[in-house]
């Protein structure tokens, strides 16, 4: 169960096989070993990605999460009562996912999260989110790798990286 109440089904033997922390918690002498549920201190998005990684060795749900959040500004209906989190908040989840990988001692997941962050920030429509990622990584002492990735994106294109919103789309000129 995630900290936001989201319940994510997972096979305890898969989690225990992938992470020494899960192994200790789920098969040790604590209350989680005797329970059908385990509380995780991360959002549902992060916990779902954690379970994905443990079972699939990849982060498909988190990739979809990032693709959706980056498009949210363009597709949001202003009449909706419940506003979705802004893309900046969603991108900050990269740092939380990296923190989660470190906590559960999943080095392969740490590598995947770094690759994902780098790929995401290399896309021109996402570069403006590099500062948000750098800011969030700065508040997590163990997230230096993510901070370096964000800093590289800022250095490679400072004008776009320092914008507070996506750059305007350039219209194609029509040849007459």
Image (tube, helix red, strand yellow):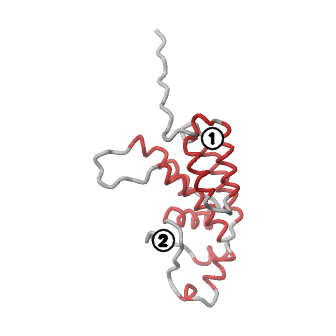
Looking at the picture, does residue 47 appear above or below residue 22?
above
Q: Quadrant of residue 161?
A: top right
Looking at the picture, does residue 133 appear above or below residue 19?
above
**Residue 54: numbered disc:** none
What's the residue at 50%, 83% (across, down)? Answer: 36
Q: Residues within 10 Å of mark 2 (few under 14, many from 20)?
A: few
What's the residue at 55%, 45% (across, down)? Answer: 129
Pinpoint residue 142: horizontal percent, then vertical percent. 68, 63
What's the residue at 64%, 47% (across, down)? Answer: 150
Q: Earlier in the sequence, mark 1 or mark 2?
A: 2
Regarding mark 1 in the picture, which secondary structure is present there?
helix
Regarding mark 2 in the picture, which secondary structure is present there?
loop
Q: Is residue 87 or residue 58 the one in the foreground?
A: 87
**Residue 3: numbered disc:** 2
The answer to whether the residues at label 1 and label 2 have Cβ atoms under 8 Å apart is: no
Q: Which residue is mark 1?
A: 122
Residue at the top extreme, as displayed: 176
Looking at the picture, does residue 37 appear above or below residue 94?
below
Pinpoint residue 17: horizontal percent, then vertical percent. 67, 75
Residue at the bottom extreme, as displayed: 29
Q: Is residue 153 left or right of residue 38?
A: right
Q: CA distance from mark 1 to mark 2?
A: 31 Å
Pinpoint residue 72: horizontal percent, then vertical percent. 43, 46
Pinpoint residue 25: horizontal percent, then vertical percent. 62, 82
Q: Is residue 83 or residue 54 the one in the foreground?
A: 83
Q: Residues within 10 Å of mark 1 (few under 14, many from 20)?
A: some
Q: Is residue 102 left or right of residue 65?
A: right
């Amino acid at each position: 169960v995630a900290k936001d109440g989201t319940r994510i089904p997972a096979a305890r033997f898969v989690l225990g096989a992938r992470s020494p922390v899960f192994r200790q918690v789920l098969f040790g002498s604590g209350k989680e070993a005797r329970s059908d549920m385990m509380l995780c201190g991360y959002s549902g998005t992060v916990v779902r990605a954690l379970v994905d990684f443990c079972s699939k060795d990849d982060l498909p749900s988190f990739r979809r999460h990032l693709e959706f959040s980056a498009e949210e500004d363009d597709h949001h209906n202003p009449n909706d009562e419940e506003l979705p989190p802004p893309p900046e908040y969603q991108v900050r989840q990269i740092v939380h996912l990296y923190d989660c990988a470190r906590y559960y001692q999943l080095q392969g997941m740490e590598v995947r999260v770094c690759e994902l962050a780098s790929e995401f920030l290399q896309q021109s429509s996402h570069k403006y989110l590099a500062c948000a990622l750098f800011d969030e990584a700065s508040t997590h002492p163990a997230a230096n790798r993510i901070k370096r990735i964000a800093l590289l994106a800022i250095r490679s294109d400072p004008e776009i990286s320092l914008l507070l919103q996506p750059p305007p789309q350039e219209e194609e000129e029509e040849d007459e």
